[in-house]
Amino acid sequence: MSIFDPNSPGHDGAIIIENGKVISFSVRLPLSDSNKLPQEFGTRHHAGLGLAEVTDALVLAVSEERGAVSLFYEGNYEPIKDKNELAARIIKHWSAIAPHQLFNQKDISKQKTIKQIALSFVFAFLFWSTVVLTQSELKEMIYTIPIDYISMPKNYLIEGETTNEITVNLLGNNVDLNRINPSQLRAVIDLSKITPGEISIRIDEKNLSIPKQVRVGKTRPSSIQLNIIEMREFDVAIKPQFIGSLPDGFVIDSLAVIPEFIKVLAPVDSVQQDSMVVLTTPIFLETITQTTKIVCNLTAPAKIKPLSNRFPNVEIFLAIREQDQNLPEP
């Protein structure tokens, strides 16, 4: 059972200690409806202010994310800078509400007074140390992050499926881990110095874009396997992809494709130049009854790539005529 573990039932509740013993756990405290608190404060601080509004208690609240200590008294809020200020405020409060005074009280010995002051400082030190230790305790969080492949030479291609994301265990203290924006985490794989063939790239701090304050525990997978093939520039023909046939009584008198050829990148070893073609997107002939121009996109096998970012559009010119019933179809 823990008040600092988010998975514990006591994480957002209170513990009541009486005479050195825990008598209640996961207690719900009265919340303040005041607008005195900054917007970043949550339930814990509103409960602290709520207690200070309905009791004469000196209430201390610790921010789990920032490790900051806040003091609430008589319905007011005040941030605490360090352990000395904390000890001074505890002594001041004690002096105001205790049944006897800490100083100048005849029936209290000097030794007892010193002990009381010492206890106050010990309490403040332990309280502050708990805050520091809690925030500095090494914790672990797991993220699934995308992989960016960058700087691959234009004449190379990754063959087959690639790994597009990895799971990373990040280690750090509460403050640093809670500051992480998951959307900014990246694994960056620099392919500028690769060579053809099967390669293995290890995933570590060098290719992970993560905050400097945290470190990497495990990654799954721990390495990326890639098969790199070399590409070469080829001239390939563009072939119209006709679907169906013209309506009865119409024939294609002539056909022109502009341009007829296009330069592409294709694997050096696995593709023969004379067998390579690039197809247009489908051209449906069922409704064409007159000469027309059609602008098409291009499609190609996965291993054939355009020289630029995308294939250009092509123009298909179809000269259509009515078929002479006395003449055979050409």
Image (spheres, helix red, strand yellow):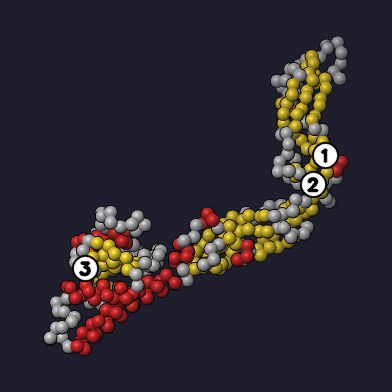
Q: Amino acid at mark 2?
A: Ala
Residue occupying the point 34% across, 70% down: 81
- Residue 95's x, y, as percent? 19, 76
Outermost residue to the top: 326
Label 1: few (<14), some (14–19) or many (≥20) C-alpha neighbours in 10 Å? some
247 displayed left or right of 43 = right
Mark sitting earlier along the chain (1/2): 1
Marks 1 and 3, how far apart at CA: 85 Å
Are the residues tagged 2 and 3 within 8 Å (C-beta)?
no
Q: Residue 325, image x and y in percent?
A: 83, 11
Q: Which residue is mark 1?
A: 236
Q: CA distance from mark 1 to mark 2?
A: 10 Å
Tag 1: residue type?
Val
Q: Within the image, what quadrant is residue 8 found in?
A: bottom left
223 or 96: nearer the eye? 96
**What's the amino acid at mark 3?**
Ala
Q: Which residue is mark 2?
A: 266
Q: Which mark is residue 288?
A: none
Q: Which of labels 2 and 3 is toward the front?
A: 3
Write down the quadrant of residue 189 in the picture.
bottom right
Q: Are marks 1 and 2 in contact (CB under 8 Å)?
A: yes
Q: Position of residue 30 (x, y in %)?
A: 24, 59
Pointer 1 or 3: first along the chain: 3
Q: Nearer the viewer, residue 160 or 113?
A: 113
Q: Which mark is residue 57?
A: 3
Q: Secondary structure at mark 1?
A: strand
